[in-house]
Amino acid sequence: MEALIPVINKLQDVFNTVGADIIQLPQIAVVGTQSSGKSSVLESLVGRDLLPRGTGVVTRRPLILQLVHVDPGDAQKSDDGRGEEWGKFLHTKNQIFTDFDEIRQEIENETERVSGNNKGISDEPIHLKIFSPHVVNLTLVDLPGITKVPVGDQPKDIEIQIRDLILKHISNPNCIILAVTAANTDMATSEALKVAREVDPDGRRTLAVVTKLDLMDAGTDAMDVLMGRVIPVKLGIIGVVNRSQLDINNKKSVADSIRDEHAFLQKKYPSLATRNGTKYLARTLNRLLMHHIRDCLPELKTRINVLAAQYQSLLNSYGEPVEDQSATLLQLITKFATEYCNTIEGTAKYIETAELCGGARICYIFHETFGRTLESVDPLGGLSTIDILTAIRNATGPRPSLFVPEVSFELLVKKQVKRLEEPSLRCVELVHEEMQRIIQHCSNYSTQELQRFPKLHEAIVEVVTSLLRKRLPITNEMVHNLVAIELAYINTKHPDFADACGVMNNNIEEQRRNRMRELPASVPRDKSVGKGPAVVPGEPPVAGADMAPAVGPQPEQDGTGNWRGMLKKGEDAPSSGPGSPLKGAVNLLDVVTNPVPVARKLSSREQRDCEVIERLIKSYFLIVRKNIQDSVPKAVMHFLVNHVKDSLQSELVGQLYKSGLLNDLLTESEDMAQRRKEAADMLQALQKASQVIAEIRETHLW
């Protein structure tokens, strides 16, 4: 069990060599208010004066103090000139300090070097190792004292800075908290215990130390506090007696102070003397740390193994230094092209889980984005009834027509089909953008080796971007042609369109029969008065019927009726001779200016003609939309996606695989060599730590 602490010291040394704090090793953190006697407790444990002293905040950087017990045989003079006790700092490498005054001065110098001389603090620790036959194996962390009010040039938030620094260390679940409180203060107001309870509410890793037992008011003692009657602490409460400032000024040794402490405890607290004092504190800390290390080692071993695997993977991603440049370049180009194509096909090694990527997003663009956009296009959008009627009348020219002119249908349907071009071109743009995103995806996840060579990465991105840029206008032109093809020939013999027309004609015929049934009984259904065809009031004659003038009186039509009514009105008008003015003359200027008044009610024939055109447009538009929805994705895949996939590697090789570019393209980034070295050092440290823990199992210490 005793050998467990040196094992932790070995682990600490291993990780100190790489300057890493990724493993939370078991240790003891000393927490207390300013001038509560923390430094005196540490010096008592070491047995020597080695810590800076003064007023205000003296400890301004964490001091990780490793006490290493050496056999008395090592106390003799050795070849390197060290005495029976010596110290070593991590930042001074292998320099050995035998004068503890020099150690104190080095601590002050190193503190000012990082924290400055204005009483500011820093979270960068100072590592000090003390070798002595008079110490027990311990790892202690001396933290800045808790303060409330900034002094001198200290920042205004010095209290928050110190508190955060303390919490950073004691939040480590492998850390034992040594909460130091002066005996001449109220235990219930102990800031050290308050902070400790924030991270250790159960008190399983908190040990309380009561200092300055000899400075309590006359007539009072710390019996209740030391017995745990005021505030119970699970790991116990230990009282100690510190050296006074006068003792320090008079150069009173720590050994003499410990003897005086023992005498004081025997006199003042005889029943508790064996369970208090500096020596008992050292033994207790040693025992607690050993048990704590034993409990932490299984989790520590797992953590080290996990980190070793992670750093091995990281080191592999950095790759080995380049020896054969040609082979390396060709390998990286091939790997990038393969990963790019695999991302499109959905067979990439790294599958994105946060969002759609590659071929999946292209599929989504085709069938969701593009498909829904086309479906949202109204076949009759932008066309009003007046627009349709105007197109019909314009298509007839100066002669009135008996049938709906086909020219008007073609004119209007082409206008509607043209609206499909914009979403089709937008589909091409979205796919092009996604293929650009695939480049970044491959760079980040699939081919991490490219991060080693930033110039090669930039060159590959430029070549692929140039290839995509070259294919974009070609694909746009093809999509434009697909729409132009549909506009070039309106195929009214299309099977789907013919079927729709047949159904529509049947519906129109059925509506005509229904209107015939609704005629008044006084009007014959099969024939009108005389030999002429039956005329439905308000409607023009049926196309193809005999247009001979009817015999007998005809019903008079209003101005919105058919041409027969207008002709009848003209016959009833009085004739005019030469030079005589016409009665009831029509203002032709008004008719020409507003040939189809918007406000007037359409005749039945006009309504029927508009309905016919609308149905024809809708039927044919749906056919064309279906064709576009099917052909545009195929064109994009052929002219853009598949072409880039097939020609990517040859394009990269042709542009980059040149002897004159090898040195430039395969130049590593400036920090890559440094990162590779750091990763290799950390991996080596983790492997050494794993070996140290393995030795523990072999020696049955665990």
Image (cartoon, rainbow, N blue to C red):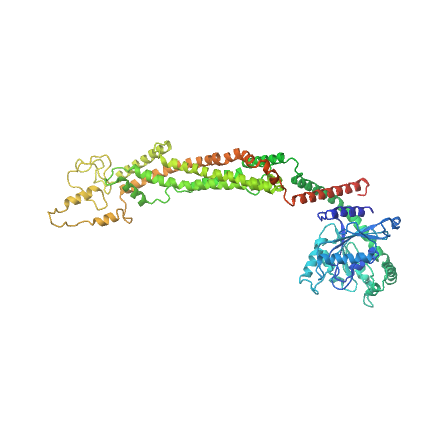
Residue 676's spot in the image, x, y percent? 68, 42
The image quadrant where one finds the C terminus is top right
Residue 288's spot in the image, x, y percent? 79, 51
The residue located at (58%, 41%) in the rendering is 457
Residue furthest to the front in view is 660
Which of 657 and 674 lies nearest the eye of the viewer? Answer: 657
Vertical comparison of 443 with 143: above or below = above
Residue 352 located left or right of residue 70: left
Residue 680's spot in the image, x, y percent? 70, 42
Asked whether residue 555 is in view, the answer is no
The residue located at (52%, 34%) in the rendering is 647
Residue 482 located left or right of residue 321: left
- Report which quarter residue 99 is drawn in: bottom right
Residue furthest to the bottom in view is 218
Asked whether residue 296 is in view, the answer is yes
Residue 244's spot in the image, x, y percent? 82, 64
Vertical comparison of 509 with 235: above or below = above
Task: Please tell me how many numbered marks the rendered image carries.
Answer: 0
- Report which quarter residue 53 is drawn in: bottom right
